[in-house]
Amino acid sequence: VIALDCGFGSTKVSVNGKVALIQTAVSRPNDIGMAGIGMKTAAKGTHSVSFGGFDFCVGPYSWYRGTPASSMDYSSIVSPERMAVFYTAYALTTPPEQLGDATMVIGLPVPLLRDETQAQMVIDSLRAMKREHKFTVDDINYSFNVTNIKKTAQPDGAYVNWFLGDDLKPRIGCKGA
């Protein structure tokens, strides 16, 4: 199971009990020759992501490496920029070997889910996630295949986090949700 929460401030991903959180900051890298060396130094800790002919820098200070993405709202969950952030967070949780088939659980904000028209457009766009994903993060290849997609309200993830410990067993004293 791959769980995804695309936040405006940070993107959270959980795979097999490991969780990663990364700032939702992404840019398209610019090659500016020797002047770029200083920018790369200023942007230490960013991640390089490549897939489908796209190249991005993701994470804090990614704006030093290129032009920042400006449209990161929920109507664009499957945009290349959002996918780059998701792939980076995924790579921070998972060894590079192929995960294989996976169910993806995506947390959506309650205000979005309350707006039927907007929610339906976003939910319809999530079908694009149901496919084989191949990408490179920091020169390491990753792949997995999403076979099922489940949508849930974002607070559900907080409840599960409260209920389950790091060993994915109910925390002591939790009687259930």
Image (spheres, rainbow, N blue to C red):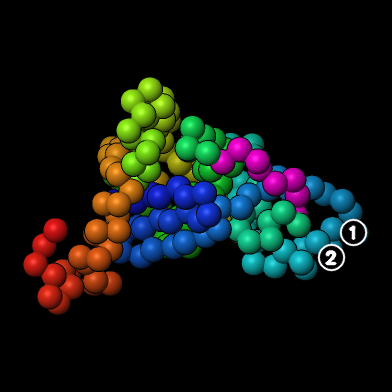
Q: Taking the image as drawn, is residue 10 in sight? A: yes
Q: How many residues crowd mark 1 within 10 Å: few (<14), some (14–19), many (20+)?
A: few
- For this view, does 6 lie left or right of residue 54? left
**Magenta-drawn segment:** 65-72
- Circle 2 sits on which residue? 38
Mark 1 is on which residue type? Ala
User: Does the segment drawn in magenta span residue 128?
Assistant: no
Does the CB distance between marks 1 and 2 fall below 8 Å?
yes
Circle 2 SS class? helix
In this rendered view, identify the residue nearer to me: 130 or 114.
114
Q: Is residue 19 above or below residue 48?
A: below
Residue at 89 percent of width and 54 percent of height: 33
Q: Taking the image as drawn, is residue 106 in sight? A: no
User: What's the mark number on residue 136?
Assistant: none
Q: Where's residue 149, x and y in %?
A: 30, 38
Residue at 61 percent of width and 38 percent of height: 71
- For this view, does 82 lie left or right of residue 45? left
User: Does the segment drawn in magenta span residue 67?
Assistant: yes
In this rendered view, identify the residue nearer to me: 22 or 8.
8
Find residue 72 and report its image quarter: top right
- Circle 1 sits on which residue? 35
In this rendered view, identify the residue nearer to me: 136 or 65.
65
Mark 2 is on which residue type? Gly
Q: Is residue 4 above or below residue 159?
A: above
Gap between marks 1 and 2 measured at Cα: 6 Å
Q: Main secondary structure of the magenta part?
A: loop
Q: Where's residue 22, x and y in %?
A: 52, 60
